[in-house]
Image (spheres, helix red, strand yellow):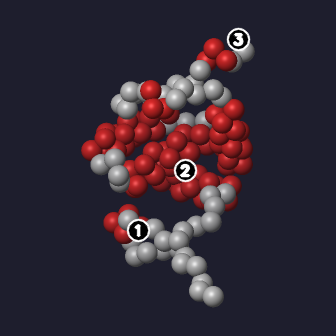
Amino acid sequence: MTKPAELVYTNTDIWGPEQPAPAVIDAAHLARQRDFSHRTFGPGPRTQGVLDHIRKELVEIESAPDDLGEWVDVVILALDGAWRAGHEPQQIIDAIKAKQSRNEARVWPDWRTAAPGQAIEHDRTAEPA
C-alpha cells in the first residue's frame, strides 16, 4: 500500500521551499498573529490604517488574481482588524464558522444568471425584517 502524498504549497515565491500544509488555523495561531501585529504595528484599533492596507492589497489582487499571497494578505489584514476591534482569537473563529453556517442557510440566486463581474447577493426577501 502506498503512502498518500503529503499536501504541499506549490507557490514557492510565497512560501519558500515546499512546506507541509498546516492542518488548521486555530486560536493559538491567531494569538501569535495578534502578538506579531501588536509588536510590529503598535496597539489600538488602527482601523483606517488596516482599511488602507486592505485597499492596496485589493489593487494587487486585481493585477494578479491568481497570486495566493495577495489573497492571504487580505485574510491576515481582516483578522488583524477583528482583533484590533476587541475580539479574541476564539471569538473570531466562532464568528467565521457561524457566518459560514448563516450563508449556507440563505437563499442564493442561480450563479449562472449572475453577471460575472458583479457580486452575487443573497435573497433578502426571505429574511425576517
**Residue 115 x %, y %:** 38, 27
Question: Marks 1/2: CA distance?
Answer: 30 Å
Secondary structure category for the residue under label 3: loop
Does 116 sit left or right of 85 as displayed? left
Question: Marks 3/1: CA distance?
Answer: 46 Å
The amino acid sitting under disc 1 is Thr
The amino acid sitting under disc 2 is His
Q: Which residue is mark 2?
A: 38
Which image quadrant for residue 97? top right
- How many numbered discs, if any? 3
* Residue located 72% across and 15% down the image: 128
**Residue 120 x %, y %:** 48, 28
Q: Nearer the viewer, residue 92 or 119?
A: 119
Of mark 1 and mark 2, the one earlier in the sequence is: 1
Of mark 3 and mark 1, the one earlier in the sequence is: 1
Q: Nearer the viewer, residue 10 or 81?
A: 10
Of mark 3 and mark 2, the one earlier in the sequence is: 2
**Residue 116 x %, y %:** 37, 32
- Mark 3: few/some/many CA within 10 Å (<14, 14-19, 20+): few
Secondary structure category for the residue under label 1: loop
Question: Marks 3/2: CA distance?
Answer: 39 Å
Would residue 43 be seen by someone viewing this image from the given angle?
no
Question: Closer to us: mark 1 or mark 2?
Answer: 1
Would residue 112 be seen by someone viewing this image from the given angle?
yes
Q: Residue lying farthest bottom? A: 1
* Residue located 63% across and 88% down the image: 1
Q: Which residue is mark 1?
A: 10
Question: Closer to us: mark 3 or mark 2?
Answer: 3
* Residue located 57% across and 25% down the image: 122
Q: Nearer the viewer, residue 76 or 40?
A: 76
